[in-house]
Image (spheres, coloured by chain):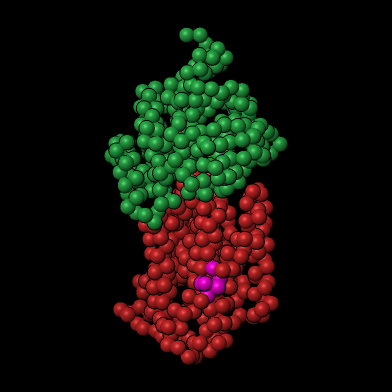
Chain colours: A green, B red
């Protein structure tokens, strides 16, 4: 039984079908990547899994439990943390307040929250330096670190990452991905949505490829790296 | 000089009432981007319930004043807070996904409903506090005239404002409220139950409005069913003055507006004091709609 099982997921925005009968899985401890062009439905997939968007059809199961129509806060309580596209840190709150909010579901256990914070500061020392700064004053890379750290505060079993490389300098992107691997090594499963297919396939074990709301390809990361269609569309053609 | 200080004191007194009411407006706007036009009527209901409890039940004569007032405030705040929850559930939540104009119309509808309901229940005349229920106690300190009610209002308003400030700034719940005001969806991703937060705001906001209503009724020694309209608008002006959605702004805006109103009444004309306040509102909306401390709205990251 996989940690996350998505079956025949369909999502509609008004009259438009954003996702059509998508099925995917994430096993505990895996890094799985979801690739596709802009508008393919990758973010929608994450938003349906984290409970922000109600599916029109299909099922989502977490460790066997059906969670399809649960509200977002219930998913966080069950160990699913979603780091949204564009970071979405709370700009008028401090770094520390943002992190504390990440630990909201554990707010009655002050110790656990403080420990979680320390672990995030260890992972991202730059955040510790800026702990009392307003999050809106941080650079793009720092905000990304904060968003990921905030997600970790919920002590998740599954981390949903939406385009962590977006808008970041290449050096920072490498750093972020190294951190994602480190987080995964600590036992957190990751579902990674990325436009940077090269890096994503480098760090993931398996991948799925979406095109206009439908699953068109799936396989082991190295298989996808070698696949001519994937290379053409997402990896910049022949090497 | 004496006139200035007297009016300053009056201004602070009335201003602190405006501040407390303004906090209700600003919190709802912060979290829902909705001007709760029914808020003024909740203030009015607080005043009427306070009057009814103190006078009609004879409580005013039976208990020592301090105790009676405390009981009064707690009961009235609680009752109006519950009403606030009902209003949220019935008039606003079903329209969460509708466009903003629809929600505004609903708010106005609630306002009309409550205002006329009060008129039907209590009658259209002004109701005045009799002397046995509310003694007139005055002192003269350093040449200034001070009344008991002024002290009570300032003290209660201060407690409420400090209490709210501590809640918003120093507790996890307060941080969650601030987060919800910035971005509902991201707040949900933190595990925050946004519906519950909204309910909480509709509990606290009306409670504050009701407390202010009780206090103002005591200050002017009378209540009438148009109180909600006029003071609601003044408190709304105060909220805009400080910056809508901005909690410290609401407090400063309220105090400042009260002082300006009373100084205007003292130095220009008492009969025109309301017009003076509304002139300020018009000028504000034309020249600086974001207020003194600026609007608190979601910022693009």
Which residue is depicted at the point 61% across and 80% down?
Answer: B126
Residue B196 locus on image (x, y percent): 53, 57
Q: Residue furthest top?
A: A238
Depth check: give the residue in front, B5 or A66. Answer: A66
Q: Residue furthest front?
A: A1
Depth check: give the residue in front, B266 or A226. Answer: A226
Q: Residue furthest right?
A: A15
**Is A101 left, or right, of B131 in this rendering?**
left
**Is B229 left, or right, of B212 in this rendering?**
right
- Which stretch is magenta? B76-81
Q: Would residue A75 be counted in the magenta stretch?
A: no
Depth check: give the residue in front, A203 or B198. Answer: A203
How many numbered marks have been drawn onto this rendered protein structure? 0
Residue A220 locus on image (x, y percent): 50, 22
Does residue B53 lie above or below B26 as drawn?
Answer: below
Does residue B52 appear in this view? Answer: yes
Which residue is depicted at the point 58% across and 45% down?
Answer: A66
Residue A93 locus on image (x, y percent): 40, 47
Q: Quadrant of residue A174?
A: top left
Location of the N terminus of chain B by quadrant is bottom left
- Overall secondary structure of the magenta section: helix
Does residue B297 appear in this view? Answer: no
Which residue is depicted at the point 36% across and 36% down?
Answer: A186
Which residue is depicted at the point 36% across and 74% down?
Answer: B2
């Amino acid at each position: 039984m996989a940690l996350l099982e998505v079956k025949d997921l369909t999502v509609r925005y008004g009259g438009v079908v954003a996702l059509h009968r998508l099925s995917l899985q994430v096993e505990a401890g895996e890094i799985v990547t979801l690739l596709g062009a802009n508008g393919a439905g990758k973010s929608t997939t994450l938003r349906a899994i984290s409970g922000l968007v109600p599916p029109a059809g299909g099922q989502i199961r977490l460790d066997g439990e059906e969670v399809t129509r649960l509200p977002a806060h219930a998913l966080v309580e069950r160990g699913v943390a979603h780091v949204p596209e564009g970071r979405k840190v709370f700009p008028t709150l401090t770094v520390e307040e943002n992190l504390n909010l990440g630990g909201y579901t554990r707010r009655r256990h002050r110790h656990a929250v403080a420990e979680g914070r320390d672990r995030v500061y260890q992972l991202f020392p730059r955040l510790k330096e800026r702990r009392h700064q307003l999050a809106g004053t941080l650079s793009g890379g720092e905000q990304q670190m904060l968003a990921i750290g905030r997600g970790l505060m919920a002590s998740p079993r599954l981390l949903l990452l939406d385009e962590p490389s977006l808008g970041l300098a290449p050096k920072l992107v490498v750093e972020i991905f190294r951190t994602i691997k480190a987080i995964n090594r600590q036992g957190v499963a990751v579902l990674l949505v990325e436009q940077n297919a090269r890096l994503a396939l480098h760090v993931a074990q398996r991948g799925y490829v979406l095109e206009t709301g439908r699953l068109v390809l799936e396989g082991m990361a190295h298989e996808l790296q070698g696949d001519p269609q994937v290379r053409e569309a997402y990896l910049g053609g022949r090497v | 000089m004496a006139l200035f200080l007297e009016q300053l004191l009056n201004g602070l007194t009335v201003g602190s009432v405006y501040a407390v009411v303004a906090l209700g407006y600003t919190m709802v706007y912060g979290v829902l981007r909705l001007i709760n036009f029914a808020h003024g009527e909740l203030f009015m209901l607080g005043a009427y319930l306070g009057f009814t409890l103190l006078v009609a039940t004879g409580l005013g004569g039976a208990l020592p004043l301090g105790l009676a007032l405390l009981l009064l405030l707690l009961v009235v705040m609680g009752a109006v807070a519950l009403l606030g929850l009902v209003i949220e559930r019935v008039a606003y939540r079903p329209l969460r996904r509708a466009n903003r104009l629809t929600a505004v119309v609903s708010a106005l509808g609630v306002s009309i409903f409550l205002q006329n309901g009060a008129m039907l229940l209590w009658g259209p005349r002004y109701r005045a506090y009799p002397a046995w229920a509310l003694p007139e106690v005055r002192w003269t300190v350093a040449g200034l005239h001070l009344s008991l009610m002024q002290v009570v209002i300032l003290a209660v308003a201060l407690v409420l404002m400090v209490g709210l400030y501590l809640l918003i700034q120093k507790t996890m719940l307060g941080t969650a409220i601030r987060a919800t005001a910035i971005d509902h969806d991201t707040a949900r991703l933190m595990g925050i139950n946004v519906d519950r937060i909204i309910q909480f705001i509709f509990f606290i906001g009306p409670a504050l409005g009701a407390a202010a209503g009780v206090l103002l009724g005591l200050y002017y020694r009378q209540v009438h069913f148009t109180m909600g309209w006029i003071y609601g608008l003044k408190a709304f002006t105060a909220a805009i003055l400080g910056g809508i959605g901005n909690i410290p702004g609401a407090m400063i805006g309220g105090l400042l507006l009260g002082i300006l109103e009373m100084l205007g009444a003292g130095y220009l004309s008492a009969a025109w004091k309301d017009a003076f306040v509304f002139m300020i509102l018009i000028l504000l909306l034309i020249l600086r709609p974001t207020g003194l401390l600026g609007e608190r709205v979601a910022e693009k990251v």
